Amino acid sequence: MSDVLPDEARLAAEIDRLKAGFPKTRELYREVCSLLFFRFGITPTANRLYQLVKRGSMSTPTQVLGEFWVELREKSRVRIEHPDLPAELQAAAGDLVATLWAKSTTSAQAALEALRADAEAEKTSARNEVTSRQAELARTEAVLEQRTGALLAAQVRIQELEQVLAAADATRRALETEIARQQDEIGARDRALVQARADFSVELDKLRSSAELAEERLRAAEKRALLEIERERGVSARSQKELEAAARRAEQSETRHREEIQALQVQLGDARHRAGVVEGSLEALRNSNAAYVRELDTLRLQLATAAANQPAAQKRSRPSVAPSKPRRTVPNVPTRKRSA
């Protein structure tokens, strides 16, 4: 063995070169054994070989190392049994090789046991770590499934909320459109209400003017009727007086004035006829006066109703005004002149 410690960097470089040149694991281990023993003077062990090569299982370097020592012993025995060597050297060489083999085997077995213990500990630790990682993986998968379910539920909820939001937005736009339309209708109704108020005021003024005119006409008709009645009463009184005078004259000169009495009788019939006509005219005037009174009451009721319904006119269209009844004129009663 060399007394100089091997260069670890050079040993690592040689190992890398052997790895590239020997892809098979057993051949690589055999070459590494030769490299350590012959070039660097290091007694190879299974643990050392595995740490350097790091291929295969732990049994591979052990088997390769055993084969290496068997081959080395066979080769050494051949050299020891060479016929040129003395018997003492052959025996000493055999003893040396046997001693080296025994020490190497013992060292290899101890290293193998240590390696097996380390491997078993690493295996146990690895199993524990695998179990822990599997449990952690199961928990992670459970959490992932929960989060995936929550994410799917959230996505479904988001879609539902998006649909609700779209429907709400459509409803909002429809409501805004409806509000704008209602505002336009309210504005139009306000304008129509203002116009209706103005028209109602005009119509009310017209109705008041018509009522005042009808009252004036009624008062004029009442005056004319009263004058006509007074005139007919005067005519009737004068006729009665004339009749009484004629009767007195007839009594005084009955015989002498028989014809005059007959004429007076004719005049009396005419006077009675005129009195009947006057009474008929008076009754007609009374009926006409009653009709005018009823018309006046109707107009007054319409004025009161219009004044009471003026606030309610804001909620309905332009009120219709009842047409005025045609003016009734008082017929002129013809008067007949008394015959002489």
Image: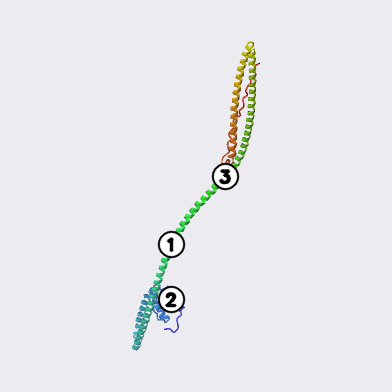
Above or below residue 229? Residue 318 is below
Amino acid, disc 1: Gln
* Position of residue 216 measured from the top left corner of the image (x, y, whole percent): 64, 31
The foreground one among 151 and 66 is 151
Per the image, the residue denoted by label 2 is 15
Please give the name of the residue rendered at 42% of the width and 64% of the height, measured from the top-left corner: 142
Residue 301 found in image quarter = top right
How far apart marks 2 and 3 lie (CA) works out to 99 Å
Residue 32 visible in the current orientation: no
* Position of residue 204 measured from the top left corner of the image (x, y, whole percent): 61, 37
Q: Is mark 3 on a helix, strand or loop?
A: helix
Residue 221 found in image quarter = top right
Q: Is mark 2 on a helix, strand or loop?
A: helix
| Pointer 1 local density, CA inside 10 Å: few below 14, some 14–19, many at least 20 | few
Per the image, the residue denoted by label 3 is 186
Q: Which of marks 3 and 1 is nearer the N terminus?
A: 1
Amino acid, disc 3: Ile
Per the image, the residue denoted by label 1 is 146
The foreground one among 21 and 227 is 227
For marks 2 and 3, give the one nearer the viewer.
3
How far apart marks 2 and 1 lie (CA) works out to 50 Å
| Pointer 2 local density, CA inside 10 Å: few below 14, some 14–19, many at least 20 | many
Tell me which colouring the rendered structure shows: rainbow
How far apart marks 3 and 1 lie (CA) works out to 57 Å
Q: What element carries label 1?
A: helix
